[in-house]
Image (tube, grey):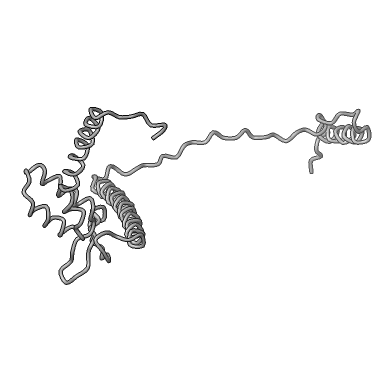
Amino acid sequence: MPGFPRIGAKQRLVAAIVLALLALPAAWLGIRGWPEQTAADFEECVEQVEAKPAADGERKALMTGCNARFAGRRKVGGGYSYYDFMQDRKFDIAGPNPTAEERQHIDHAYMGFLDAQRREAVSAQLAKRKNEQLRADMEIAAQPVGPPLVLKPTIATPLPVKRPLDRSKSLRCEDSPLSCSWAKFSAAVKDAFASSPMPSR
């Protein structure tokens, strides 16, 4: 064969040994894992693990593998159920694992579950606040009543009394000369009557 180097017998022997060494672990793993791979559901997988002789740690690992491969559990009377630990609830499913539609239904139920829990938490918080307010009101009502509150009137300072202005003095003659003349005239008449003695009868 042109293009390929010639391999000697010694090199062929080394290659065969290497291939044999690689094939042995692969075959051992394939035979060892064979019962779990043909199981139809969790219960069948567990039966196969228990029927096979194995060390305790190896048996636990195989059981964990069964649990990881199959989410559903057989129901009495047929069918499967899936337990959702987040909701602490079981769902009926068609096969050993939920389908995409069943997963969507479970997720939708979980969203409703979370919403109900949130509403419960808000309700509990409101009830707690109301209870605390009621207790505070009861404590206030139970306290002894003190002496009555006495309201004392405060004495208001009297407002200054405005005196009537003497119009004759307050007028300025520059603003209104006619009224100023009239004011002077009426003042002179008053003074004349005031200074004259009253006739006796």
Task: Using the image as rendered, state which of residue 197 and residue 169 is in the foreground.
Answer: 169
Q: State the image coordinates of residue 151 (x, y, percent, origin top left).
A: 40, 41
Q: Where residue 38 sits: x, y (%)?
A: 20, 57
Total label count? 0
Residue at left offset 6%, top offset 49%:
53
Counting from the top left corner in percent of width and height, residue 26 is at: 21, 42
User: Which residue is at a point 12% across and 55% down the rendered structure image?
Assistant: 48
- The single residue placed furthest to the right in the displayed view is 178
Location of residue 32 in the rendering, given as x and y in whole percent from the top left corner: 15, 47
Residue at the extreme bottom: 77
From the viewer's perspective, tell me whether residue 64 is left or right of residue 106: left
Residue 94 horizontal side relative to residue 186, left or right: left
| Residue 175 image-quadrant placement | top right
Quarter of the image with the N terminus is: top left
The answer to whether 77 is drawn above or below residue 138 in the figure is below
Q: Quadrant of the C terminus?
A: top right
For the point 18% across and 64% down, which residue is it?
74
Choose top left, top right, bottom left or bottom right for residue 5: top left
Of residues 166 and 49, the one drawn nearer to the viewer in this rendering? 49
Along the line of sight, the residue nearer the viewer: 1 or 114? 1
Residue in the picture at 89% in, 29% down: 173
Q: Is residue 35 left or right of residue 179?
A: left
Q: Nearer the viewer, residue 192 or 197?
A: 192
